[in-house]
Structure formats: structure tokens, C-alpha cells
């Protein structure tokens, strides 16, 4: 199965909290571009990780309609894919402590990203939900969906990442 684990001994609640705090710090504050976009983690669920961000005037790509810039959509979907893989890796190695798991993310990088822009990026709040489709020893693949606050699907993405 996708979420095979190296051990059946899960990390304790305190260590899980430390891992989530470290992931939140990394993802929301220490990655400057994510901070610029205003990305916030909404769910660490390895079955469907979620991030969100709010619309701002500096994210507009079409000044007449106030639509979200396509590059912002692409960047957020890329970030969502990498975050989902981080959650899946944390689950796969759930017997490891926070520091050990965080160390596993040092070599992650995007290999391929395909974005389908389905509707104009109109909204006040956007959420990207991502599923890990496959997590191998070297490569991980994801599928993401970006929706606005009404649930309208704005774009989808399929991506592949180096994970080792």
C-alpha cells in the first residue's frame, strides 16, 4: 500500500506535535516564497494534506478582473505537492522523531509539474488539497486541486518530486 511504514511504533503525541510545529515553521516562515504567498497549513493529514492562502492585490494577474495570477496558482500547487509528500514521508517513517523526519526533506525537489487551469482564479480564500499518489524510495507523485471559498475548482496539478 501507499503508506507502508518502517515500523508499527508510532511517534508519541508530543513528538508528533514537535514535528508538526517544525513543519509549520519550515513551510510557513522559513521558505521565503511561501511566506510571500501567505501560505498557511490547514491539515497535516497524509491522506489529503491541505494548505491555503488569501487573495491580496499583489497576487492579481489580470488587473481588470482581479483574477489570481497563473504563476501564483502554479507555485501554490507545487508547494502543496511538496507539503503532501512531507506528510506522507512523516507517516511512512512514523517511528522516527521530528528531527530525523525533518532531515529527510533536505533533498526534496520538483521534477515535473503539470497544471490544468480550469476556471478564472476568482475568490477571497483559496485552498489546495493534495493526495500522494505514490511514494517510492526516490520519487514521489501527487495530485492537487485548488478551490476557492465556494468550492469552485480553479486548477488541478499532477507533480513528481525527488524525495531522497
Image (spheres, grey):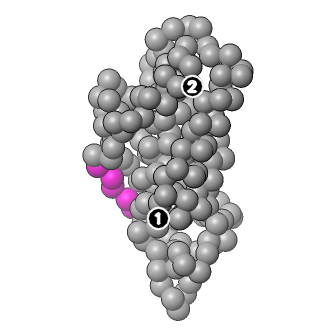
Residue 129 in the image: above or below residue 115: above
**Crowd tier of the residue under label 1, counting other residues whose Cα lies within 10 Å: few below 14, some 14–19, many 20 or above:** many
For mark 2, what is the residue?
98
Q: Could you say which disc has been placed on residue 73 in the image? A: 1
Residue 92 in the image: above or below residue 25: above
Q: Residue at point 43% right, 60% down? A: 75
Q: Residue at point 56% right, 83% down? A: 66
**Residue lying at the far bottom of the rendered structure:** 64
Gap between marks 1 and 2, in whole Å?
30 Å
Q: Find residue 88 and report its horizontal and vertical position in percent.
A: 50, 30
Q: Could you say which disc has been placed on residue 43 in the image? A: none
Q: Residue at point 63% right, 34% down? A: 20
The local secondary structure at tag 1 comes to helix
Q: Is residue 127 visible?
A: no
> Most prominent secondary structure in the magenta stretch?
strand
The local secondary structure at tag 2 comes to helix
Residue 149 in the image: above or below residue 2: below
Q: Find residue 142 and report its horizontal and vertical position in percent.
A: 42, 41
- Depth check: 146 or 94 in front? 94
**Crowd tier of the residue under label 2, counting other residues whose Cα lies within 10 Å: few below 14, some 14–19, many 20 or above:** many
User: Which quadrant holds residue 1?
Assistant: top left
Q: Residue at point 41% right, 69% down? A: 71
Q: Is residue 50 magenta?
A: no
Q: Find residue 163 and report its horizontal and vertical position in percent.
A: 35, 33
- Depth check: 65 or 102 in front? 102
- Position of 111 with respect to 65 (left or right) is left
Residue 77 in the image: above or below residue 50: below
Q: Is residue 98 visible?
A: yes
What's drawn in magenta, residue-wise? 112-116
- Give the mark nearer the N terminus: 1 vs 2: 1
Q: Is residue 114 magenta?
A: yes
- Position of 108 with respect to 76 (left or right) is left
Amino acid at each position: 500500500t501507499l503508506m507502508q511504514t518502517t515500523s508499527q511504533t508510532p511517534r508519541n503525541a508530543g513528538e508528533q506535535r514537535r514535528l508538526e510545529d517544525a513543519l509549520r515553521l519550515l513551510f510557513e516562515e522559513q521558505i521565503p516564497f511561501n511566506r510571500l504567498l501567505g501560505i498557511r497549513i490547514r491539515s497535516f493529514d497524509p491522506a489529503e494534506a491541505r494548505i491555503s492562502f488569501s487573495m491580496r492585490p499583489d497576487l492579481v494577474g489580470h488587473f481588470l478582473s482581479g483574477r489570481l495570477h497563473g504563476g501564483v496558482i502554479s507555485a501554490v500547487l507545487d508547494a502543496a505537492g511538496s507539503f503532501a509528500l512531507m506528510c506522507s514521508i512523516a507517516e511512512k517513517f512514523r517511528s522516527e522523531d521530528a528531527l530525523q523526519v525533518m532531515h529527510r526533506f533536505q533533498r526534496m525537489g520538483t521534477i515535473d509539474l503539470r497544471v490544468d487551469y480550469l476556471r478564472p482564479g476568482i475568490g477571497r480564500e483559496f485552498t489546495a488539497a493534495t493526495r500522494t499518489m505514490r511514494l517510492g524510495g526516490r520519487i514521489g507523485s501527487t495530485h492537487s486541486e485548488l478551490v476557492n471559498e465556494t468550492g469552485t475548482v480553479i486548477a488541478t496539478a499532477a507533480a513528481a518530486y525527488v524525495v531522497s
